[in-house]
Amino acid sequence: MNLKERSIRLKRDIPAIYLALKKKETPLLAKICAWATIAYALSPIDLIPDFIPVLGYLDDLIMLPLMVILTVKLIPSDIFEQCRLESEGFWQNGKPGRWFYALPIVSIWLLVLIVIVRAIRF
């Protein structure tokens, strides 16, 4: 599988991860990783803003695929395959556009800002 096919497959796995998050059979650690992955994937705010040259694309090219891979590995394969089948055409009309998915990213940015301000004060 080449890089482009792998990237397309990983993006198709996001709705399956969303469905696996809601299943009772999914282990707790997998649910935590699934929640973080879905929140990051659906957030309208990037962890690393795209206006920062080169670094801005790291989240889409490295961080999100790594989060998806880790989450898929933690979900039992039979559950994930079932979720993949259920997720076919799941978000054909586009991803859900809810702003609460941005809360984890905004929290990280606020934490970084607080650390910077405290470092400057002392």
Image: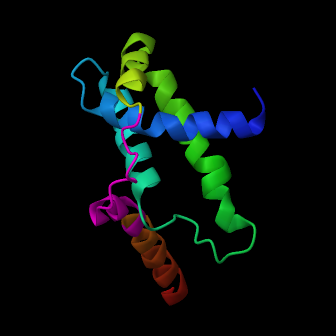
Which of the 4 quarters of the picture holds residue 27?
Answer: top left
Residue that appears at 37% across and 17% down: 82
Which one is in front, 54 or 108?
54
Which of the 4 quarters of the picture holds residue 49?
Answer: bottom right
User: In the image, residue 2 lies at what x, y percent?
Assistant: 78, 32
> Where are the magenta residues, as a range?
89-106
Residue that appears at 31% across and 32% down: 19
Q: Is residue 113 on the magenta stretch?
A: no
Q: Quadrant of the N terminus?
A: top right
Which of the 4 quarters of the picture holds residue 108?
Answer: bottom left
Residue 13 shown left or right of residue 89 in the figure: right
User: In the image, residue 107 lies at what x, y percent?
Assistant: 37, 66
Residue most extreme to the right: 2
Residue that appears at 45% across and 39% down: 14
Which one is in front, 48 or 121?
48
User: In the image, residue 85 lies at what x, y percent?
Assistant: 40, 22
Residue most extreme to the bottom: 121
Residue 23 shown left or right of residue 40 in the figure: left
Q: How is the image coloured?
A: rainbow
Q: Is residue 36 above or below residue 107?
A: above
Which one is in front, 19 or 67?
19
User: In the image, residue 66 lies at what x, y percent?
Assistant: 60, 39
Residue most extreme to the left: 24
Which one is in front, 98 or 30?
98
Q: Is residue 77 above or below residue 32?
A: above
Residue most extreme to the top: 78
Q: How many marks?
A: 0
Q: Is residue 24 above or below residue 87?
A: above
Q: Is residue 104 on the magenta stretch?
A: yes
